[in-house]
Amino acid sequence: MEEESNSNILERNFNTISPSAKSLLLMKGHTNIPFAKQTAELVMLPVKYTPDFNLKDRTFWARVLHFENRYWSINQLLNDLPVKNILELSSGYSFRGLEKIHEGDYHYIDTDLPEMISTKKEFVSALQSNNHNAKGKLELLPLNALDENSFKEIVSRFPAGEVAIVNEGLMMYLDNTEKEKLCSIIHKILMEHGGYWITADIYLKNKMDKLDLKINKGTKEFFEQHKIEDNKFNSFEDAKLFFNKAGFTVDKEAHINSSQLSALKYLRKSISLFQLFKMSRAGKMQSSWRLKVAKV
């Protein structure tokens, strides 16, 4: 039965997720996230990409702030690790790998579905055209994160040493069986190589309504198509229990100072004091955790 279940997972078509990566990138172009604005400009060609900082839309700016926070939360959990081998899953139009190899001698493997990786390679070439001072090594490779054999083959490309596996925006597309499969693969990898799993995908159900954010029809339909709300966790405690059951323990939780986020001032211009109070009372909708294999 397990072999049949795994086969069904590998046959699933994830390509419909890709349009969300473009939409997310255009939002990130309003932030200080490395390479986001430059890549948004490339994506929109031949149309000129001009971020609208005069937009008074609290839902838009709340989402921009959230995604900006999520990006830096991953970096925060990576930066205090001595690990030089980093594998990012389902990276979309994020260029953390390009950022990291200019910081130090990292071996960074950036993965996503084949079509996304093919396009992304063109962007990386364009972004690197005026900057050849890389200290590390970046590879862009296609990977379905639920394909255990391909996952292991990619990890084998790293030199000896611990591995940091990173994902930002993946698990909300996975149902419980698929989440368990991903956990199983990563647990085996970390048992063999040592290291950490950093995930920004600890999302809680039914928080959007409490935050009083009015998402547009297209976004709502996308969420419903991929059952994103159903795939979130009931609580942070439930998430911890889920990962504990899969053999992990929470090593560290990210805490970002929101006053340092570039989108905050635009959100404040787009929201009333009452709305700001209401959002603050809703509580956290997401957290980023660094996980490690639990000691037996």
Image (tube, grey):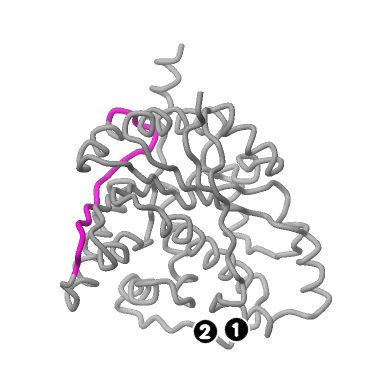
**In the image, is residue 119 part of the stretch drawn in magenta?**
no
The amino acid pointed to by label 1 is Leu
Mark 2, residue position: 52
Viewed as shown, does residue 23 lie left or right of 138?
right
Residue located beneath label 1 in the image: 55
Taking depth in this image into account, of 16 and 249 the one nearest to the observer is: 249
> Which amino acid type corresponds to the residue marked 2 in the rendered image?
Asp
Give the image location of residue 282, x and y in percent.
78, 59
Judge by depth and name the residue closer to the eye, 187 or 94: 187
Residue at the limit of the structure toward the top, as seen here: 1
Q: Position of residue 45 (x, y in %)?
A: 31, 76
Mark 1: few/some/many CA within 10 Å (<14, 14-19, 20+)? few
Residue 155 screen position, x and y as percent: 27, 38
Mark 1–mark 2 distance (CA, rounded to whole Å)? 6 Å
In percent of the image, x 36 and y 49: which residue is there? 88
The answer to whether the residue labelled 1 contacts the one labelled 2, judged by CB atoms less than 8 Å apart, is yes
Q: Is residue 3 above or below residue 275?
A: above
What is the span of residues highlighted in magenta in the rendered image? 134-149
Rendered residue at 64%/70% (across/down): 62
